[in-house]
Amino acid sequence: MPIRTINNKTVDFDDEGFMTNYKDWDLAIAKVIATEEGIPELNDRHVVVLEFMRKEFEIKGDGPSIRKLTKESGVPTKELYELFPSGPAKKAAKIAGIKKPHGCI
């Protein structure tokens, strides 16, 4: 597992770049990961999705499916793909500091 220091905080990642302990996450870490994922700036709508992802992960131990994400987060599918291009559920999970959702390739 790669260990990185982000904003003076030691964070463990798995081989695919997902954080191994979601409790280490904060918005400063999210901003760094987002930049690495090609999203130069997080706005309020990004944060709505990230918080929804984290809430679902805390409750169920897995990130939500894309369908649940668009149905229950209040962010429509088209906007979700604009916010997190090229696989929004997987990319949002990575930035939210949770494990890769089951069903994501």
Image (cartoon, rainbow, N blue to C red):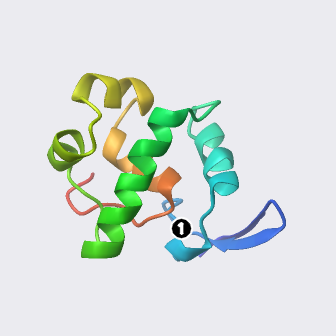
Q: Please indicate, yes or no, whether residue 61 appears anywhere in the rendered image.
A: no
The residue that label 1 is drawn on is 19
Q: Nearer the viewer, residue 25 or 36?
A: 25
What kind of element bears circle 1?
Answer: loop
Give the left or right position of residue 72, taking residue 41 as reference.
left
Q: Nearer the viewer, residue 95 or 74?
A: 74
* Residue closest to the far right: 8
On screen, 36 above or below 96? above
Q: Residue at position x 36%, y 64% from top?
A: 55
- Residue 102, quarter of picture: bottom left
Q: Nearer the viewer, residue 103 or 95?
A: 95
- Residue 11, quarter of picture: bottom right
Answer few, some or many: residues within 10 Å of disc 1's Cα (few below 14, many 20 plus, some between 14 and 19).
many
Q: Please indicate, yes or no, whether residue 39 appears anywhere in the rendered image.
A: yes
**Residue 69: x and y, percent?**
24, 46
Q: Residue at position x 20%, y 46% from top?
A: 72
